Image: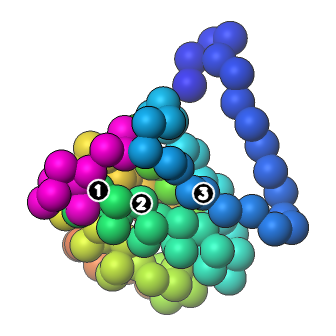
Amino acid sequence: CTLGSEVALRVGGDFFFDPQPGDSPVNLVLIAGGVGINPLFSILLHIADLHGYQEGKGNRHKLGTVKLYYSAKNTSELLFKKNILGLMRAFPGRITCCFHVTQQRSQICKELQPHVTGK
């Protein structure tokens, strides 16, 4: 987003992301904390499926980028972190993630280090 951009924000409740062929592409910012990652991880997997389908079969979906911000106490509580890293590798520049930890006591593994901020 840039200064003056219009954004839609939704907290809790029933929500989904179901772009239709012909829809204008949208860039998503997904924000999760702790186990709140579950529905957003499903959205992330759906977007990855659409990206994969688009590359392989000429899908008519026009997809933007996805930026996931995900916070937990420490890296051991970051659910699906290996899957998320895999999606970032599979779709570089289109799916990105910033992990944030608030109470990390141990060394962060090298694979996660470039993507983790916090204490």
State which region is magenta: 53-63
Element class at badge 3: loop
Q: Is residue 2 above or below residue 48?
A: above
Amino acid at circle 3: Phe
Q: Position of residue 16 (x, y in %)?
A: 67, 62
Labelled pair 2, 3 in contact (Cβ < 8 Å): yes
Q: Is residue 74 visible?
A: no
What residue sits right under mark 2 in the picture? 47
Q: Residues within 10 Å of mark 1 (few under 14, many from 20)?
A: many
Q: Position of residue 37 (x, y in %)?
A: 62, 74
- Residue at left offset 53%, top offset 74%: 42
Is 49 positioned to the left or the right of 52 in the image? right
| Residue 107 badge | none
Is 19 positioned to the left or the right of 64 in the image? right
Element class at badge 2: helix
Element class at badge 1: helix
What residue sits right under mark 3 in the picture? 17
Tag count in the figure?
3
What residue sits right under mark 1 in the picture? 51
- Residue that sits furthest to the bottom in the current view: 76
Question: Looking at this view, is 103 or 27 the one in front?
Answer: 27
Labelled pair 3, 1 in contact (Cβ < 8 Å): no
- Residue at left offset 26%, top offset 51%: 59
Amino acid at circle 1: His
